[in-house]
Amino acid sequence: MAEKTIFTRIIDGEIPGNFVYQDEHCVAIRDINPAAPVHVLVIPRKPIPSIADLAPEDHAVAGHLLMVVKKVAEQEGVAKSGYRVVINAGDQGGQTVPHLHIHILGGKQLYGHGTA
Ligand code: AMP
């Protein structure tokens, strides 16, 4: 079996995570190295390595993740002021954790299209 990702270890309670949302399909945790005042990661419980690995059976969870992004942005108080949603994929995309996750960045003015 493949080694657990750091996000699966957080989801399984093996290492601490700062959870801001949880449901049966996904969790949201604060990024340990925030690039903005609000920096939350929405992560499916299923350890899909990357957006490139989404399979037809992941259709519902993929859509669900976006609904949770919306909910967490409201909860974090950035829905009105605006925020950025980022998914890094693969080496050149800058992905460092091989477990699909959506960054929510907000709480300050963001420019361009980077993550900070
Ligand atoms: P990416 O570069 O898109 O793969 O993003 C991975 C993100 O996970 C980075 O922003 C890291 O700061 C964050 N991260 C790594 N380890 C942890 C952790 N233990 N708890 C919370 N966030 C983490």
Image (spheres, rainbow, N blue to C red):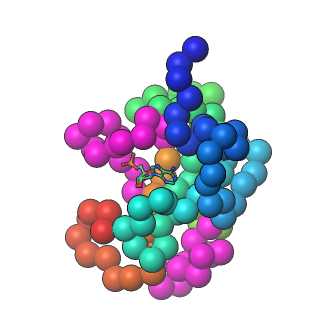
Which residue is pictured at 63% across the width and 51% down the height?
Answer: 16
Q: Position of residue 115 (x, y in %)?
A: 32, 63
Residue farthest to the front? Answer: 15
Which residue is pictured at 57% across the width and 71% down the height?
Answer: 73
Q: Position of residue 52 (x, y in %)?
A: 40, 32
- In which quadrant is the C terminus drawn? bottom left
- Judge by depth and name the residue closer to the eye, 43 or 65: 43
Say if residue 66 shows up in the picture. Answer: no
* Dominant SS type (magenta): loop
Q: Is residue 97 magenta?
A: yes
User: Is 84 on the left-hand or right-hand side of 54?
Assistant: left
Task: Report the number of numbered marks.
Answer: 0
Say if residue 89 shows up in the picture. Answer: yes
Residue 30 picture quarter = bottom right
User: Is 37 on the left-hand or right-hand side of 95?
Assistant: right
- Judge by depth and name the residue closer to the eye, 96 or 56: 96
User: Is 38 on the left-hand or right-hand side of 62?
Assistant: left
Residue 90 picture quarter = top left
Q: Position of residue 9 (x, y in %)?
A: 61, 38
Residue farthest to the right? Answer: 24
- In which quadrant is the N terminus drawn? top right
Using the image, determine if residue 3 lies above or below residue 9.
above
Q: Is residue 38 magenta?
A: no
Which residue is pictured at 28% across the width and 45% down the height?
Answer: 94
Residue farthest to the top? Answer: 1
Magenta segment boundaries in residue numbering: 72-100
Which residue is pictured at 75% across the width and 51% down the height?
Answer: 23
Q: Position of residue 70 (x, y in %)?
A: 59, 66
